Amino acid sequence: MSNMNDRTDGGDSLLTVVVAGGANLAIAVAKLVAGVVGGSASMLSEAAHSAADTVTEVLLFTAIKRGERPADRAHPLGYGNAAFLWALMAACFTLVVGAGFSITHGFHTIFDGEELTDFTLAYIVLAVSFVLESVSMYQGLRQLRQSATRWETRPFALLKRTSDTMMKAVVLEDGAALTGIVIAFAGLGLTQLTGNTAWDGAGSVAIGLLLLFVAVTLIRANAGLLLNRSASVTLERRILAHLEVLPEVERVVELLTVVIGPNRILVAARIDFVDEATGAALESASAEVERRLRGEFPEIREVFLDPTSSAEDRF
C-alpha cells in the first residue's frame, strides 16, 4: 500500500475547488433571495452557509496558488505550508460567519418567532441547490476515489490522513451542504405542517452545529499540518524498505519525515553504511536511494541522507 498521506494531483484539487466555488456562489444568491422573500430562518442560515463556503473556496484557491510558489533563498523548502495557513483561515471563516450566524439566528427565531410567507420558493431553491451541490460533491468524491485507488486504501481513510486540505475541505463542506439542505427541508416542512416556526429555527441551529463540526475538524487538521506533522506510518515503512534493500546499507539508524506542503514531504535519514563501502559507492548509493524514493513517491520533494557509523550511534 502506498502512502495515504499526500499523493493527490494539484490540478485535480484546483478543479475541485473551482467547481465547488462556482456552485456555492450561485446557490448562496438563490438561497438569500428565497430567505428574504419567504422569511425563513433555515433558508437564511443556508444562504450564510453557502456564502461562507464561497469565501472558503476563494481562500482555498489562494492557498493552492500560494503553496505552488517555487523555493527561493528566504524559503529554501518552498511555500507549501502557506497552503495550510490559508486553509486554516478558510475554516475559521466558516466557524465565525457560517456557524455563528446560523446558530444565533436560529435561537432568535425559536424564542421570538418569524413570519413565513412563501414555502414554495424555498422548496424550489433547496431542490435546485441540492442538485448543484451534488455536482460539486461528485467532483470531490471522484478525486478522492481516484487518489484512494492509487494508494490502495479506502476513500475515507485517505480523507482522514491526507495533507491535501483543499480536497478535504471541499468534500467535508459539500457533505455538510447536502446535509444542511435536508435539514432545511425538514425544518420548513415541519413548520408548514404544525404552524410552529420553532421548527424552522431549530433547523437553523442544527445547520450551525453542522458547520461548527466541519470548521473545527478542518481547523484541527490544518493546525496539525502547520506544526510539521510526519508522514504516515505506512509511507515510513515503505521508505525503510527501499533503504534497507540496498547492499551498501548496513542499517537505518533514524528516519524522519515531515510534511512541508500539500503532497510534499521531506525525508531525512541517518544511515549506517557497510564498512567496505568506498566514497564513490556511498555517493552512488545515496543517488540511488533518492532516485528510487522520488520515482515511487512523487510527493517526496527533498531527501537528506547522513552517513553514520555504528560507533557514532552508540555515543
Image (cartoon, grey):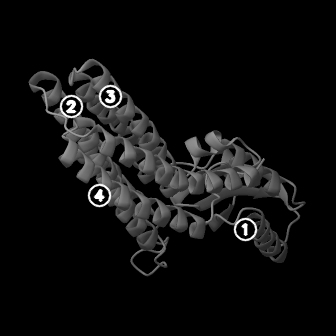
Judging from the image, what secondary structure is the residue with disc 1 in?
helix
* Label 2 sits on residue: 106
Going 51% across and 67% down the picture, which residue do you hit? Answer: 14
Judging from the image, what secondary structure is the residue with disc 3 in?
helix
Residue type marked 4: Val
Q: Position of residue 110 (x, y in %)?
A: 17, 24
Give how far apart the Cα atoms at labels 1 and 2 are.
52 Å
* Residue 29 marker: 4
Lateral position of residue 255 relative to residue 46, left or right? right
> The C terminus is located in which quarter?
top right
* Label 3 sits on residue: 187
* Whether label 3 touches label 4, CB < 8 Å: no
Going 72% across and 68% down the picture, which residue do you hit? Answer: 294
Residue that extends furthest to the left in the rendered view of this protein: 112
Q: Earlier in the sequence, mark 1 or mark 3?
A: 3
Give how far apart the Cα atoms at labels 2 and 4 are.
20 Å
* Residue 282 marker: none
Judging from the image, what secondary structure is the residue with disc 2 in?
helix
Give how far apart the Cα atoms at labels 3 and 4 are.
20 Å
- Residue 101 visible here: yes
Q: Which of marks 3 and 4 is nearer the N terminus?
A: 4
* Label 1 sits on residue: 294
- Residue 227 visible here: no
Lateral position of residue 21 relative to residue 40, left or right? right
